[in-house]
Amino acid sequence: MDFKLEELNTDILIIGGGTAGCFSAITAAEQSNFKILIVEKANIMRSGCLAAGVNAINAYIGKGETPESFVEYVKKDSEEVVREDLVYSIAKELNTVIKKIEDLGLPILKDKDGKYIQRGKRSIKINGENIKPILANAVYKHSNIKVLNKINIIDYIVKNGEVIGAIGFSLEEPKIIGIYAKVVICTTGGAAGLYKPNNPGFSRHKMWYCPFNTGAGYAMGIRAGAEMTSFEMRFIALRCKDTIAPTGTVAQGIGAKQINGKGEAYIHKYGKPTTPIRLYATLMENKNGNGPCYLKTKGITKEQEEELFKAYLNMAPAQTLKWLEHNRGPSIENIEIEGTEPYIVGGHTASGYWVDINRRTTLKGLYAAGDVAGGSPKKYVSGCFVEGKIAALSAIKEIAHKKTPKKDNKILKKYLKKIQQFFRNENSLISIEELEESMQKVMDEYAGGISQGYVINKNKLNIAEKRIDELIDLAYTLQAKDLHDLLFIHEIIDRLYVCKVLVQHLKARKETRWKCYQENYDYPKKDDKNWKKYVNSVYKSGVVKIIFRDLIGRDEFYEHSYR
Amino acid sequence: MNFMSIHIDKEKCIGCGKCIIVCPGSLIYQDNNGKAFIKYPKDCWGCTACLKQCSVQAIKYYLGLDMGGGGGYLTIKKEAEYLDWYITTKEGKTKKIRINSKEANKY
């Protein structure tokens, strides 16, 4: 295939036009006159996690709560291994960014005095069906933001240890683009599709986390040598069975209890009900023959049921379709629940780039925000906004007197060669789909997927390590017949790099810190004496080097030492 | 007919290309007659972004059999600030749910 080569300049390059990316761009556009470029692999109107919508803002400082109490909650729920400094910086800004998104047009439920009606201590009710168009329209209002849709970024351009741009290709025409920028903000989201999913057949992409978030930002950072943190703290969600739709709407919204197949409430049997314990308890009830487990909704009023139909249409329409196409509903049957496959997602757990308080990564010139940034679990949508804002504000200061980096045509030519090779791999013995399924099977069976009850041990992880390395080699032999194949291949390569790092993180934490997320059967107990620390890593020349770091407290100041 | 993630009716499709633009997986393409079709049905997330863009309701959303789908489907019609959702059972019975996009959810 003949590719056109194109080189572009901008001041601020934002990779990924989702929650954090759009908010970052809007902030930078409002606070500076810099040229901002959002590059997005789909279209910012409906790309990323919020494509279908979202039904609540789950990180909000509600009545009686404070930023300090928010930090305490996140710390306790995450078994204390979190970056309290980062969580605190998010907590302090949550209500400000929520007001901003409301002003942009997001409907939030209010009482007669105009106060938000809370769904829980830290949650408010919205109609987030069109939150993505709201964000996109706000982006398009700024003349200093340019958006390039349908461009898939595959690597950073790094010169003398500094990120000076990124390389990508178009999904619409054979074109490779090199973008040079004074600063780069990575907001590509987390990674789904690493493990065999709940519905491994025809409905393989009917998952909770966005299946098009394939860890590109993590993988690019890994390959460029950025330090990553807490990959071993995987996120596994408790969701409605089969549709994998969220459960908070029912659990928090109408206060439905988790019950087992015998109709008994079971959570209390498993200790304090943290997020991982609610999942673990469900898994154990099934294992012990007490399944299936449900959210008890039977007997709710018809009016409540109608509202639930609407709430689900606004974020996960499959659930409402499933009820109504069978003439059923939550008032006449309980909702069966199950755990998902493990995801790597920094908006829910702590996996991602190791960043400082300004969201600078360990690579000069590169920031990370949202699901791709690590250290601060439970940031959710509003926390991603805050991180986008923090990164943008710091970035515009940093580049105040910076010159645009010089273009280097050699880099584009190097990537042209790499990309064309995929079209030349005519003798490839494997298909893209086969490789994807092999990766997911390896991770499922040897790195604690659904089939293993999420449990890991060293012997199995060693097998995963070996197999993932073999699959990385094989991925470069895959054949692309068109641009979409090229996208699929890069999405697999990126996920394989994430898997490679994930396996090393799982091996490194020799304790069990979080049930299900990281349950190491060689070390089945939590070991506070030795393991109240972060597991970090840096990849270099094919090897993942593990680095242990001490916990950083709420009011401590952390700075990268080698940046 | 096989159960599809989404199914685009070629008779109804006017070839405007809006569904192609918004699909977060870029899974929809145009055929030689300019009509939209889903090239990778197994990769559909089920977000229904394409249904919301379609001005002629040419797109139906089905659940796969492996996730409990039984042949019923969903269509969406946009009317000013309202989204009208139609859920039709296999037997042809349709329920309409109207949602005002300017109103917050109760739960």
Image (spheres, rainbow, N blue to C red):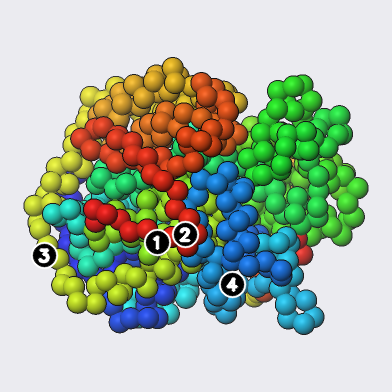
> Label 3 is placed on what type of residue?
Lys
Residue A557, numbered circle: 1
Please state the horizontal and vertical placement of residue A203, each as a whole percent of the image: 57, 36
The residue that mark 4 highlights is A95
Real-space CA distance between mark 3 and mark 4, rounded to the nearest whole angstrom? 41 Å
The amino acid pointed to by label 2 is: Asp
Observer able to see residue A19 = no
| Residue at mark 1 shares a chain with residue at mark 2 | yes
Q: CA distance from mark 1 to mark 2?
A: 7 Å
Q: Is residue B53 left or right of residue A295?
A: left
Q: Is residue A12 above or below residue A257?
A: below
The residue labelled by disc 2 is A85
CB-based contact (under 8 Å), mark 1 and mark 2: yes
**Whether residue A88 can be seen here:** yes
Which amino acid, by three-letter code, is at mark 4? Asn
Q: Which mark is residue A353?
A: none
Q: Which residue is mark 3?
A: A406
Marks 2, 4 in one chain: yes
Identify the image quadrant of residue A187.
bottom left
Point out residue B61 in the picture as x, y percentages from the top left corner: 62, 48
Tag nearer the camera, 2 or 4: 2
Specify which label sits upstream in the sequence, 3 or 1. Answer: 3
Q: Amino acid at mark 1?
A: Phe
User: What's the CA distance linking mark 3 and mark 1?
Assistant: 34 Å
Chain of the residue displaying label 2: A
Residue drawn 47% across and 62% down?
A555
Specify the quadrant that holds the C terminus of chain A.
bottom left
Q: Is residue A45 left or right of residue A171?
A: right
Q: Residue at x 59, y 64 (%)?
A: A68
Q: CA distance from mark 4 to mark 1?
A: 23 Å
SS assignment at label 4? helix
- Provide the chain ID for the residue under circle 3: A
